[in-house]
Amino acid sequence: MNRVSLKLSLLAALVLWTTPSWGQFSPQAACQNGAAPRTSIYYVNGVTTTLDEARLNGGKLEMEFLTRLPAMPANIQSSCYLFFLNYNPTSGAVKDFTEAGQQRLGINPSDMWRKLETFVSLGPTMVSLLQGPMTQTNQIDQAAVQRHANAYRAQLTPPLCRRVVVVPHSQGNLYANAAYDAAVGPSPAPAPAAGALKIVGVATPDTLVKGNGRYRTSTGDLLIGAIDVLLPATLDANTNWGPNPILTSFTPLYSGGHSFMGYLSFDDSRNQILSDIQSSLSEVNAVAVCP
Amino acid sequence: MLIGRREGTVGVILLLALFAGCGSETSSPPTAVASSLAGTDANNDGVRDDVETYIDTAYPVPANVDTNKALRQYAKAAQSSILDADDAAKSITHVTERFRALECLMARRPTDFHPVFVELRARMLDTNPRSEAYLKADSQAAAVNIPLLPADQWVGACI
């Protein structure tokens, strides 16, 4: 067995150990009922996340949620959940990042792609590239913010009349917060019902979650930890990836403790994020949309 | 955050040690044709030969036929993305194809699709021009709302 195969085998073993096994997913029962309410769950990616990774992260969120759904209260199971991606364009940042990584660390392109998640979190060498885009709203793409806000508002208002829960990761939290006010504001008419949009932040570099939303940041998240040193108002860490964050942040693909895939692969963070989503769904489900 | 920061410092040290043990996994220098944007595709199936060799070696058929086919589906879509990165409309089409391939992969490998994907993409984006073309294709499609299939339909995304 060569080194690559050995690494993949070890990683697969660890993933299998930490991840519940899924069967083939059946259609949600509520989705077979045209009269059942629809609730939209959006994933918003962070910086240095390509479209492919964003799709996989959204898929991971959907799989974990659907695995947990049968254990949720009946009033939550009675809704049909639809999953969407609100993409935060990051190809420019990835290009800068990979170039800097190669120049500063002397790593070939393939290895750069293998370790992209890790490099994102690696101390001052890379954090300096991300600090601005990760924390300053004037450095995020305003066209994307408006596009996201329009998407949420379209879900919340006629003819769709759906509740919305947004799950942003990393810099995506800035996008979700920036889009929130435009999505729920009074104009253009009709205004969405108050409280029908909730945010559940993951690995947030921000100082708040709009709409009294929830968030989870790991104590082992090196990138958010570094940002917190520079900007102490950053929301404090409140979860972890297992009893020993060092061991889990040593997992090759998820090292650095920042990846969305890692947050949804290890407990306590996975359980707590899903619980936050469940609580948020209970809140939005209590709102009469399009009364 | 103090506990996390101290653990983080130790983590960085461990990670650097890890990288030291993760040297280059690439083989001998490729020829000019092989290292061109398109690379070589002797059987003209849309999948670069070196990528095809990797897929067949890591996931041999018939034991891994579903994974093998899912990865070929992604590799073909990604190769098209790389070659058509200057064309916005084609880029959107190819990103959509990549999404279907990834949904197929998630259906086939629900517990380890991520490391499987990361290694395949690393093999495909083994030069700077290929990496830049892949990112350019992403930028062409970044503002487009590409529909996602629900999890119960992912198997149907497999070609």
Image (spheres, grey):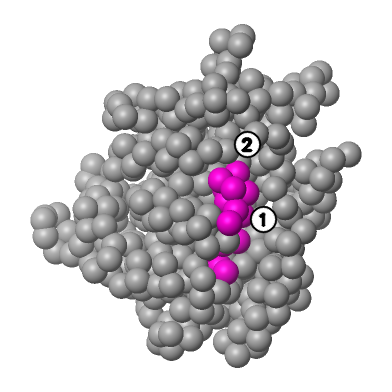
Which amino acid type is shown beneath numbered disc 2? Arg
- Nearest the camera: A181 or B128? B128
Magenta residue check for A108:
yes
For residue A266, the mark is: none
Query: In screen coordinates, is B48 left or right of A245?
Result: left
- Do we see residue A277 in this rendering? no
Mark 2 or mark 1, which is nearer to you? 2
Which amino acid type is shown beneath numbered disc 1? Leu
What span is colored magenta in the figure? A106-122
Q: Main secondary structure of the magenta part?
A: helix
Query: In screen coordinates, is A99 left or right of A118?
Result: left
Q: Quadrant of residue A239?
A: bottom right
| Residue at the spot of label 1 | A253
Q: Residue at x 62, y 67 (%)?
A: A256
Residue A33 spot, x, y in % from top left: 46, 36
Q: Quadrant of residue A284?
A: bottom left
Q: In this picture, is A202 found above or below A99?
A: below
| Residue at the spot of label 2 | B123
Looking at the rendered image, the quarter that the C terminus of chain B falls into is top right
Q: Residue at x 43, y 29 (%)?
A: B81
Question: What secondary structure is marked by label 1?
Answer: helix
Magenta residue check for A143:
no
Residue A243 spot, x, y in % from top left: 76, 76
Q: Quadrant of residue A257?
A: bottom right
